[in-house]
Amino acid sequence: MNTTKAKLMLASWARSFATAALTCYMTYELVTWKIVMNAGLAALIPMVIRYLNPKDAAFGRLAKAK
C-alpha cells in the first residue's frame, strides 16, 4: 500500500472515529476515555471491511492489481 492510500484510509478512520466519539459524548452523561477509545476501536470496523473487500476500488486489497 502506498502512502497516498494510507493517508486516505487514515482520514476515513479519523472521520469515523470523530463521529463515533461525538455520538458517545452526546448520548452519555458521564463520558470516560474508555468509552471514547471503544468508539475509536468500533470505528475501525468499516475500514477493515473495506480493506478486506477485493471489489472495493478505493481501499480493497486487490485495488492496485486492476
Image (tube, helix red, strand yellow):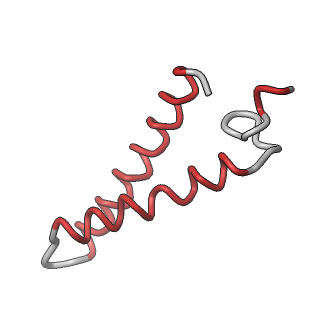
Where residue 38 sits in the image (x, y, percent)? Answer: 33, 68
Q: Taking 8 as reference, is 36 above or below it?
A: below
Q: Residue at (66%, 49%) from the top-left corner?
A: 50
Where residue 43 sits in the image (x, y, percent)? Answer: 45, 58
Q: Residue at (45%, 45%) from the top-left corner?
A: 13
Q: Is residue 53 left or right of residue 10?
A: right
Q: Residue at (57%, 56%) from the top-left corner?
A: 46
Where residue 42 sits in the image (x, y, percent)? Answer: 44, 64
Q: Is residue 26 left or right of residue 20?
A: left
**Looking at the rendering, which quadrant does residue 21 occupy?**
bottom left
Q: Is residue 20 left or right of residue 61?
A: left
**Looking at the rendering, which quadrant does residue 60 occupy?**
top right
Q: Taking 11 as reference, is 49 above or below it?
A: below
Where residue 65 sits in the image (x, y, percent)? Answer: 83, 27
Total numbered labels: 0
| Residue positioned most to the right | 66
Q: Is residue 35 left or right of residue 61?
A: left
Quarter of the picture holding the N terminus: top right
Q: Residue at (29%, 59%) from the top-left corner?
A: 22
| Residue positioned most to the front | 1
Quarter of the picture holding the C terminus: top right
